[in-house]
Amino acid sequence: MNEEFYSGFVAFVGRPNVGKSTILNAVLGQKISIVSRHAQTTRNKITGIWNGDHCQAVFLDTPGVHKPQNKLGEVIRKTTIDALGEVDIIVFICACDDPLGAGDRYIAELLQKKKTPVFLLLNKIDLISREALIKKLAQYNSLYPFREIIPVSAKTGENLTVFTDL
């Protein structure tokens, strides 16, 4: 047997309420991260370990990136920014049903400073039409040179295996 085994750390980053925790729970097949409609439910990094056939990934579910309004917001933002320096892969998660906005552009700017490979998961594809998805793919493709863009639905599980098979 000469099969190599890979392992590494993967950070989920994105604005609040884009589905980072829902994706983590779906990929792991169990609920380890709190899911809520309320923004900033995740205040610390949540760690989950996923085992594939020839690999292992330690996922870090980070708090949503937003403009801090107080000291707590600053600490939460710093937690996320620090996590980006600790990982082998960054997964930027955006919600298809939200417009591409200043928050997404801000995160893309932060990612420009990293040498870490960045993948984009466009979540909530179950909430938009195929035509709208094609437009979203084009918008995000021009935002940043992602290693790969994968449209997914954490709720239905659609395309999550495309992500985990990478």
Image: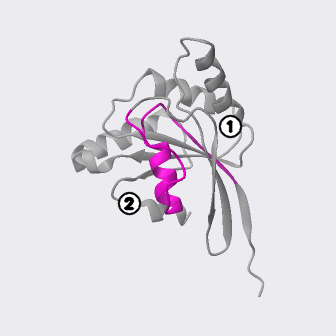
Left or right of 149? Residue 53 is right
Dots 2 and 1: beta carbons under 8 Å?
Answer: no
Q: Which residues are magenta?
A: 9-37
Residue visible at 67% across and 25% down in the picture: 78
| Image position, residue 115 (x, y; %) | 71, 40
Q: Residue furthest top?
A: 70
Q: Residue at x 53, y 17 (%)?
A: 67
Residue 31 magenta-drawn? yes
Residue 89 appears at what percent x and percent y? Answer: 65, 48
Residue 56, by quadrant, is: bottom right
The residue singled out by tag 1 in the image is 84
10 Å crowding of disc 2: few (<14), some (14-19), many (20+): some
Question: Mark 2 or 1 closer to N-term?
Answer: 1
Instruction: Say above or below: 1 vs 88.
Output: below
- The image quarter in which residue 97 lies: top left
Is 123 contained in the magenta span?
Answer: no
What's the distance in space between the residues labelled 2 and 1, CA to CA?
26 Å
- Residue 163 in view here: no
Q: Nearer the viewer, residue 70 or 154?
A: 70
The amino acid at mark 1 is: Leu
Q: Residue furthest bottom?
A: 1
Q: Is residue 17 visible?
A: yes
Q: Residue at x 63, y 35 (%)?
A: 44
Q: Nearer the viewer, mark 2 or mark 1?
A: 2
- Residue position for label 2: 157
In the displayed structure, 52 sits above or below 32; it is below
The colour scheme used to paint the residues is one colour
Q: Is 11 displayed left or right of 29 in the figure?
A: right
- Measuring 53% from the left and 61% from the top, which residue is drawn there? 28
Q: Which mark is residue 69?
A: none
